[in-house]
């Protein structure tokens, strides 16, 4: 598959620009909450990278959670199990905490449904909020982000890929399946 | 010949034996088990992967432990589990194995977990079920016990990290042991450079050397510098079969004691598939000592069986 950005499309901001927007958004979102009760939970793999960096940049306490939602997907019957290299890691009691779920791209909403189901198997959180780098539309479930650094309408053939350089910087690429 | 455990896409659809499975498939099972191990620490230990699936435990031969761990594994995957005590039912009324299976398949079974005293029974069942039904061998005759071998491999990898620099000794009744056979195939496939078999001549099968195994009849000799010791249960019925003089005599020569254990590497791990005969193949001081990882094996066994059921259930029909 070759990556291509058709000229009739608005140019995407860079990964780092979007991350800065996301960081400001999350900061504002957690401002009214008691910081010791706030935990970021990143979804593997893009969301986990974002959550880990946000956790550090925002000076949050404890550890951030990482979710591998493959055990909770709703398409196991069709595609089987595809586990991530890194299993879920939630090293804090979830009950009574304010969780900020972090993902790179919000699309159908099924990943977030799976993530919430998994989180509730760890305990009953006080609240869950969702923040994403990009909301690309195309929802199949009644799920919305509390904050999205960018909203953009993409077609089914489009695929957004977040990558992390060795230096830790984020890059974003739009791939087109038709190309 | 096509491996009968794989479907036409090369996916594992039944688990009958570790023999002939690639390193890639074995490693995939161990990696998948890795994602299930942390569930044991959670308040809610279940995940919804096999919700709506029916797992039938068909134990034609008794086994409390293996059946229970399969039951726990299936339950944690949210499957519906049905335990059939076959000895007490149809088989004793004269129904053939395949008729029993056909009837259970008609009850919408998705996975059969089969233990049978006849070698080859799970394979026979696997050959006759519809493509959407999966068979997991929970021990057949002297043939194979693949989930035990896989949980042993998981335990070894957990403690030793790497297979490619290990000396592993399998000790005891290797002749009658499906565990030994499955372990030897798995160890070899995963790249263990030196697998040793330690047993009296009467309990050693022929052909071990051809499988790349070093054979020892002197336990002290065989334990020198090993990283892993897999003890096998000495089945009481062997004593009656004139293969061995007495349990006491066996313990003297092949029982694992502190003194013999000292010949192995200082960080050796001691494994046993259970149930243990203390004072026959293993001394209590060793079984309860710091080198024993026997209870870890039980815990990992659940995760490994979850991995196997998930992988076969996820194979395309």
Image: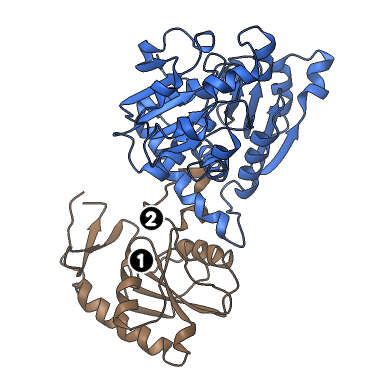
Using the image, name the chain to which the residue with label 1 belongs: A
Name chain B's colour: blue
Left or right of B172? Residue A27 is left
User: Which class describes the residues within 10 Å of circle 1: few (<14), some (14-19), or many (20+)?
Assistant: many
> Disc 1 designates what residue?
A48
Q: Does residue B79 sit above or below B2 in this rendering?
A: below
Residue at disc 1, secondary structure: helix
Judge whether B155 appears above or below A18 on screen. Answer: above
Chain with brown colouring: A
Q: Where in the figure is residue B251, as x and y percent of width and height?
A: 58, 23
Q: Quadrant of the N terminus of chain B?
A: top left
Identify the chain of the residue marked 2, using the numbered disc in the image.
A
In terms of image quadrants, where is residue B241? top right
Disc 2 and disc 1 in contact, CB within 8 angstroms? yes
Q: Residue, x 52% and y 17% (percent of image)?
A: B174
Which residue corresponds to the image point at 45% horizontal and 21% vertical from the top-left? B219
Image mark for residue A107: none
In percent of width and height, residue A102 lies at 39, 72
**Local secondary structure at mark 2:** loop
Looking at the image, residue B245 sits to the left or right of residue B315; the answer is: right
Q: Mark 2 sits on what residue?
A: A86
């Amino acid at each position: 598959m070759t990556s291509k950005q058709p000229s009739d499309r608005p140019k995407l901001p860079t990964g780092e620009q979007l991350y800065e927007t996301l960081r400001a958004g999350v900061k504002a979102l957690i401002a009214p909450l008691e910081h010791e009760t706030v935990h970021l939970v990143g979804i593997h793999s893009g969301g986990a990278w974002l959550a880990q960096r946000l956790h550090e940049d925002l000076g949050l306490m404890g550890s951030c959670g990482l979710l591998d939602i493959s055990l909770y997907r709703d398409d196991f019957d069709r595609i089987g199990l595809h586990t991530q290299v890194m299993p879920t890691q939630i090293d804090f009691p979830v009950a009574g905490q304010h969780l900020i779920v972090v993902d790179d791209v919000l699309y159908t909403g099924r990943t977030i449904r799976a993530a919430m189901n998994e989180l509730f198997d760890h305990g009953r959180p006080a609240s869950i909020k969702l923040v994403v780098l990009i909301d690309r539309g195309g929802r199949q479930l009644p799920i919305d982000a509390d904050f999205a650094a960018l909203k953009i309408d993409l077609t089914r053939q489009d695929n957004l890929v977040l990558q992390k350089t060795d230096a830790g910087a984020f890059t974003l690429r739009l791939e087109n399946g038709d190309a | 010949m096509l491996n009968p455990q794989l479907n036409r896409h090369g996916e594992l659809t039944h688990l009958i034996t570790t023999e002939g499975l690639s390193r890639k498939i074995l490693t995939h099972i161990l990696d998948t088990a890795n994602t299930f191990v942390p569930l044991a620490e959670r308040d809610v230990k279940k995940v919804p992967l096999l919700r709506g699936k029916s797992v039938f435990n068909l134990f034609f031969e008794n086994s409390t432990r293996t059946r229970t761990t399969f039951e726990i594994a299936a339950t944690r995957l949210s499957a519906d589990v049905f335990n059939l005590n076959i000895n007490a039912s149809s088989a004793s009324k004269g129904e053939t194995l395949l008729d029993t299976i056909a009837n259970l398949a008609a009850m919408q079974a998705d996975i059969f977990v089969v233990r049978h005293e006849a070698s080859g029974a799970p394979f026979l069942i696997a050959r006759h079920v519809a493509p959407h039904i999966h068979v997991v061998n929970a021990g057949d005759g002297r043939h194979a016990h693949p989930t035990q071998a896989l949980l042993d491999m998981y335990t070894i990898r957990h403690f030793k990290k790497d297979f490619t620099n290990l000396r592993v000794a399998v000790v005891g009744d290797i002749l009658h042991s499906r565990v030994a056979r499955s372990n030897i195939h798995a160890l070899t496939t995963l790249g263990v450079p030196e697998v040793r078999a330690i047993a009296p001549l009467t309990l050693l099968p022929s052909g071990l050397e051809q499988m790349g195994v070093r054979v020892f009849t002197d336990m002290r000799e065989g334990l020198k510098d090993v990283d892993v010791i897999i003890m096998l249960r000495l089945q009481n019925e062997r004593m009656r079969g004139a293969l061995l003089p007495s349990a006491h005599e066996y313990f003297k020569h092949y029982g694992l004691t502190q003194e013999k254990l000292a010949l192995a590497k200082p960080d050796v791990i001691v494994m046993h598939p259970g149930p243990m005969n203390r004072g026959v193949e293993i001394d209590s001081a060793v079984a309860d000592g710091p080198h024993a990882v026997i209870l870890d094996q039980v815990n990992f066994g659940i995760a490994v069986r979850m991995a196997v059921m998930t992988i076969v259930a996820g194979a395309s029909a």
